[in-house]
Image (cartoon, rainbow, N blue to C red):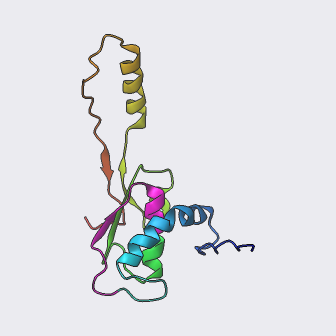
Amino acid sequence: MVRRPRPRPRLGGRPGRRRAAASGAAARGLVGRARLRPGRRAGPRSPDGVFCGNDLTALGVLAALRDAGVAVPGRTQVVGFDDVAGAGFFAPPLTTVRQPFDELGHRCLRVLLDWDADPAAVHRIEPELVLRGSTRR
C-alpha cells in the first residue's frame, strides 16, 4: 500500500512563512491545546503570552494566532529568541531576545586557547531584550 504524504499547512507564498510551517508543528500544537483553531474565533482561554525557543517558531505561532483571530499583542503576546535578521519585519514585528553571538564566539575561543583556565569557571553573557510590536510595553 502506498501512503500519500500529509498535506502541508498553507501559510501563504512568502518563503519565511513556508519555513515557519515546518517548525510550526510545535506552534500548531500549542495553539491547538489552547483551543484555537484556524477559521474559528478564540475563546476566553487563549494564552496571555507565548515565549518561543526561536524566532522561526514564534513566526509559526504568530501565523496560527492570526488564523484563529487572536489579536497580537492585544489578547496574546509573543516573544521569540535569537533575533533573526527579519524579526523586525514580521506582522507584527517580533519582540525577541538577542544573544551577542560575536561576544559568545570570542569568549569561547579564549576559553579554548587558555589551557590553564579553570574548567569549572562560569562565563556569563547577558542577552538583550528587543521590544517590538508583538508585546505590550
In the image, residue 82 sits, relative to residue 25, either above or below, namely above
Q: In which image quadrant can residue 132 be found? A: bottom left
Q: With respect to residue 120, does 44 lie above or below?
A: below
- When the figure is inspected, residue 106 is found, relative to residue 47, above or below; the finding is above
Please report the residue visible at 51 percent of the width from the left and 61 percent of the height from the top.
23
User: In the image shown, does 85 or 50 lie closer to the viewer?
Assistant: 50
The part of the image, by quadrant, that contains residue 26 is bottom left
- Is residue 62 visible in the rendered image? The answer is no
Residue furthest right in the image: 2
Instruction: Count up the numbered dots.
Output: 0
Identify the residue at image location x=38%, y=31%.
Answer: 103
- For residue 15, what is the image quadrant? bottom right
Quadrant for the N terminus, please: bottom right
Q: Position of residue 97 (x, y in %)?
A: 35, 51
Q: Residue furthest top?
A: 116
Q: Work out whether residue 118 or residue 49 is closer to the camera in this orientation and state it.
A: 118
Residue 11 picture location, percent across and down: 58, 73
- In magenta, the rendered stretch is 43-61
Return the x and y of residue 130 as percentages of the image width and height: 34, 53
